Image: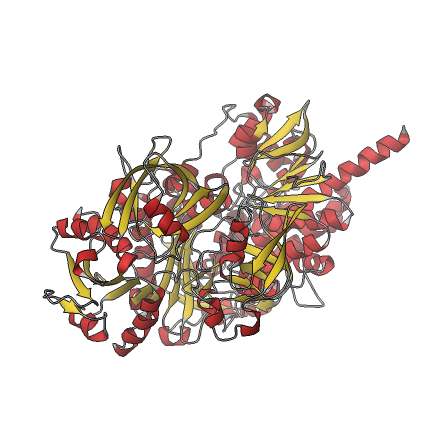
Amino acid sequence: MNYYGFLQDVGGASRVTKMRREAIENASVFPVKYDAIAETAKAWHPGKLRLVVKEIKQASPTAKTVRFVRKDGGELPYFYAGQFISLEFEIDGKTISRPYSISSAPFEARGEGSFAEITVRRSKGDGFIADYINDKLKAGDEVTGNMGLGQFYWEPLRDSKHVVALAGGTGITPFASMAKEIAAGKLDYDLTIIFGSVSAGDIILKDELDRIRCDKVKIVHVLSGDDPSWQGERGFITADIIKKYSAEDSTYFICGPQAMYRFMREELKKLDIPARRVRFEVFGQARDITAYDGYPAEKAGETFSLTVKRGIAEDVIPTRACESLVTAFERAGIKIDTACRSGECGFCRTKVLSGEYFVCPENDGRRAADKDFNYVHACSCYPLSDMTVRIPIE
Amino acid sequence: MKYYKDHYDVIVIGGALAGLSSALMLADKGLDVLVLERHNLPGGVATSFVRGGIEIEATLHEMMSIGEKGNRLKVGKFFDDMGVDIDWMKVPECYHASLPGLEVTLHPGLRKFAGEIDAVVPGTFSKVLSLLELCDRVYNSVNELSIHHMSKPMMLLKHNDFVRTAGYTTKEILDTFDLPQKALDLLAPYWIYVGSGFSDLPFTIYAVLMADYVGYGSYIPRKFSHEISLKLAERAEEMGVQIEYRQHVEKILVKDGKVYGVRTARGDEIHSDYVISAAYPNKVYTSMIEPLSEVPEKAIKMVNGRRLGLSAFSVIMILDRTAEELGIKDYSIFRGKTMDTDACYEELKGLGPYNYATCICHNLANPDATPAGTCSFSITTLPRADGWKAVGPDRIDEVKHKVAKALIDDMSEYLGVDLLDHILEIVIETPMTISHYTGMWNGCIYGYAHTMEDHIIARLQTEEEDKFIEGLEFAGAHQISGDGMGPAVTNGRKAAKLVLDDIAKKRKGASAK
């Protein structure tokens, strides 16, 4: 090997040092501040935005559609049809957030007049924010929003060109967005929405859905209530109905109430559909945490004290065993960033320094190493003793 | 409410591997350290995420400079010394090279590696081995010289190979070995981990890379790279470091050429005489220093006179079959339509098609990485930001899918199975994704390119000339050791050492008075 013969130069270090000095000496003195990559990223994910309620309209006898625009008049972020927005409402000096699927289409957020809509049904008394939106929110009110979030959207490299959407109640919202985007020619797949409602007189977004004229979009209403005049499908969305409207190798998207998710898991099993063809929207905060296997029933009615560390500051607040840490924070006026409120997104990642807790098994999206070090997603974590936690400063 | 102390000994901007390594080393010396991280978890790109209940590695391919327990290399030893106990798993091979007319799996160990090349290109054993041994000597010299300063005659005496190869490109040195093209091709695949074509890549860098990976093999953490990041952060907190997540530092406060603190997006002004920044010098000197009048012209020239390194484009998939069922046999496959690294580098300036990619099947180093019956498979290429800068928000979705599909189609053809029929989860990461989560300048993860004009030796020689503001140091891929998770740790330690030296100097000065 004769590389020594070639490499007689022992002054290489000095030579490259001179080259570097010269390159810098000859460089421009103009400061380049612009980062084009960051600007594109920001157009999709600007973070929290101040929004104004532009208009509220009835979406069914029991539901309302709220239209938001940016307070600064600019364009809303790009997003995928099916994604959600996390909204923060300031009510009585407290900040409470909720995720809502965006019911308007991505193209409607582009250009002048850019807007986004959510559609929310009045609750049966257990939905504080749902009722606030239906009864109190009005045009001109301001909220903070972060969009588009979540993984519930059609991915061309993964999903079939034939999509069967299974919707229950307000679970129609992500599909309304998809349907409008397809009808506008912005997305290219066939969408059959099987939409479960109780009665023909209270179908959410019915007028809007009826207006969609597009060969690629088909809507099948299924009513569970007794309505003698109804000519269409009846009962729940069963395996038989799903099969009837499926194509070969369809992808299934499911969005609706929790009871429906549990029902659908079983119905879909009967059809022997490969796992990659089934996409559930996030589950939502557990209705009753005490009903889960492994939950220590004797703790259900207890209250505890929760020490919350932020930086060098410390607060002590009360908690209830049956409520998530996020609920406790919000009630006490302690701000925490949240989004999906289903344990998936990890926005509310919280370090548990001491205390016992229960994590909702249907909403446990934690990383393995996080579990080892007692990190929880506060929206799916329930106290079983006094606790001390650390959260980010908001 | 008061969230911060009135004053910290050091503020570290960025809680990824570099910043956390700085923080650990400073805390180990008893300093009061605050780390401000913009995301809600540590690690920057050294992280993982969960989709559909499955944890997915965001970045890591493999980490070098770890070494076996009991015989640790530089980075592994630092973790041990700091009490950071990572559950390392050894990657079985160096790589499988899938090149025109060549399908070869190469394993660590200099002799083994040379032997495996000889098996397909007979008669090359001794030449390849002597090249690898040269790499090893240069590597040992670099490690020693990064700790001990040495006089020129001593350098020549003890580090002859290092000195004599310092001024040459990788291509120039490889050419002297007079190897057949096929053997050269098999010695090239790791180039992408440093990201310059061989005619511009300092041999010193190539030597360190090859000696470390081929000599000692590589490692991955059992619980994804989040395990590394989290254990560093947890240990730092245990040692008294205050880490605050979701705190985006907007300004570095400077007066009379000296740092005195930072201001966050939330509006907190926090004071310290030392700031270590993981934010790129480009961003710091053009928009973060307050007031900007404190930035000397020379600092702008320094960032403008250097070329940014590579960014990344990854298609990460969870597939609904095992690796075995899909015919994936190696943890790491480097697939190149050509091994002309200069041509590959040129291609990375554009938007594809990219003819050079690295694929990782996690399960082949860590069988339990995904649920039974599935495997993870990622295809990564490392474009420069240049081409992607022209892709605005209205086109990014279309472009990323087009690029991703081309990569998937190529690997499908290679494996003889259509991967599109097996995707349980898919995530496409672009330079914009990196920018979004980490704020890194232009989504660039490789810092400044290792080139002959920005040679690591020159960086070391001109270290003092790159310093413009008292009390301000940098830690990240943009520093002397460059890109990669191992070098990130080294860069972080270096920044901490500069701060410690300065404190010691000032104390000495004060006591002398």
Coordinates of residue A386 in the picture (x, y in percent): 64, 61
Query: In the image, is residue A163 above or below residue B281?
Result: below
- The residue depicted at 30 percent of the width and 76 percent of the height is A269
Q: How is the image coloured?
A: secondary structure
Q: Residue A263, located in which quarter of the rendered image? A: bottom left
Quadrant occupied by the N terminus of chain B: top right
Q: In this view of the protein, can residue B119 be seen by the observer?
A: no
Q: Is residue A123 left or right of residue B81?
A: left
Q: Is residue A55 left or right of residue A213?
A: right
* Tally of numbered tags: 0
Coordinates of residue B45 in the picture (x, y in percent): 51, 51
Front-lying residue, A74 or B459: A74
Query: In the image, is residue A263 above or below residue A116?
Result: below
Q: Residue A351, located in which quarter of the rendered image? A: bottom right
Query: In the image, is residue A113 above or below residue B239?
Result: above
Q: Residue furthest right?
A: B512
Coordinates of residue A161 in the picture (x, y in percent): 21, 61
Quadrant occupied by the C terminus of chain B: top right
Q: In this view of the protein, can residue B69 be seen by the observer?
A: yes
Q: Residue B350, located in which quarter of the rendered image? A: top left
Coordinates of residue A8 in the picture (x, y in percent): 63, 44
Front-lying residue, A273 or B62: A273
Q: Is residue B379 left or right of residue A376?
A: left
